[in-house]
Image (cartoon, rainbow, N blue to C red):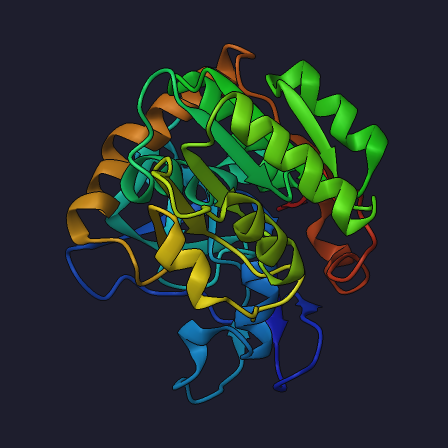
Amino acid sequence: MKAAVVFQKGELPKYTKEFPEPKVQSENELLILVKASAVKNLDKMQASGKHYSTQNEIFKEKVVGGDGIGFLEDGTRVYGIGISGMIAEKAIVDKNRIVKLPGNIDDATAAALPNAVMGSAPALLFRAGLKTGETVLINGATGVTGKIAVQIAKFYGAKKVIVTGRNESALKELLALGADEIINLKQENEAFLEQLKNSHNQIPIDVVIDYLWGQSAELILSALKGDGSFSHRTRYVTVGGMMSDTLTLSSSVLRSTDIQISGSGLGSWTREEIKLLIDKILPEMFQLAAEAKLTIDTVKIPLKDIETAWDINIDGGKRLVIII
């Protein structure tokens, strides 16, 4: 079968026409005829062996891609999480981790949406416990997942959504997706702190969803720092480390502030939460997208061009989708 395969650790995936087809090994597995699969940072890191989920993995040649959409053997069109690599003509999926797709959602949108939903909805619901009427700050909101997080936060009842980023025009575009206030990370630190503190003092921030970490997180935590009087409770959830994977955290921030810091990602969710994600959240999001109430921008590339497409420079607000 045709597939995108990493043959040597550290190499880019290569297009091949003659890779062995995967075989169903148990009653919990299903064969899927893949039509589209999105390329995410997670896929790139797992393919290179740099992601924490692959740290104990013994490398062998493999098809890349963690999820995708296509047809089951009975003709049902579904989204599925791969047991085998998904950027190929055929793949094996877990029958308990598939979602039937609405008829009026296109392949690229259906393939691109789930990872962004997984990077936002669980953080908002499972870790932050977002409640109707609350204020949400999304740090690093101009990327694909951040843009989805803005829309989902509003869908789940956030009254106010504050967004940060370095691209002023991209930040302004978020206003049309539901953002209420933009804060540019390119401004001087003192100006950033002053703007955020003023916003927090006017309407306290209940939830922070952070895709950047690093210095930006240090600044936000500093802005939330209390002065010894009663402070507003804020739930801070880290989802990524695009700026840096580490930060310097003063003990006084935690001692002076009613703040809860947690993370959302592979390994942090319970089995019950994953079931809720598959059974309820993703179907709901697919339906919203089918009704044009949830939008995601994509760039479509054919499978044969995988090697050049893998590291192609794509606008940060768009998702690369490989069409099979």
The image shows residue 299, relative to residue 130, as above or below, that is below
Q: Give me the residue at 31% from left, 35% from top.
A: 125
Residue closer to the observer: 104 or 73: 104
Q: Residue at x 61, y 76 (%)?
A: 6
Give the x, y percent position of residue 143: 67, 42
Q: Position of residue 26 (x, y in %)?
A: 18, 62
Return the residue found at the far front: 228
Please state the total of marks drawn on the protein image: 0
Image quadrant where residue 187 sits: top right
**In-image side of 62 versus 302 (left or right):** left
Front one among 123 and 320? 123
Residue 57 sits above or below residue 89 on the image: below
Whole-percent x, y for residue 186 in the image: 82, 46
- In the shown orientation, is residue 50 left or right of residue 277? right
Taking the spot 43% from the left edge, 89% from the top edge, the residue there is: 58
Question: With 310 as the anchor, is 66 left or right in this view?
Answer: left
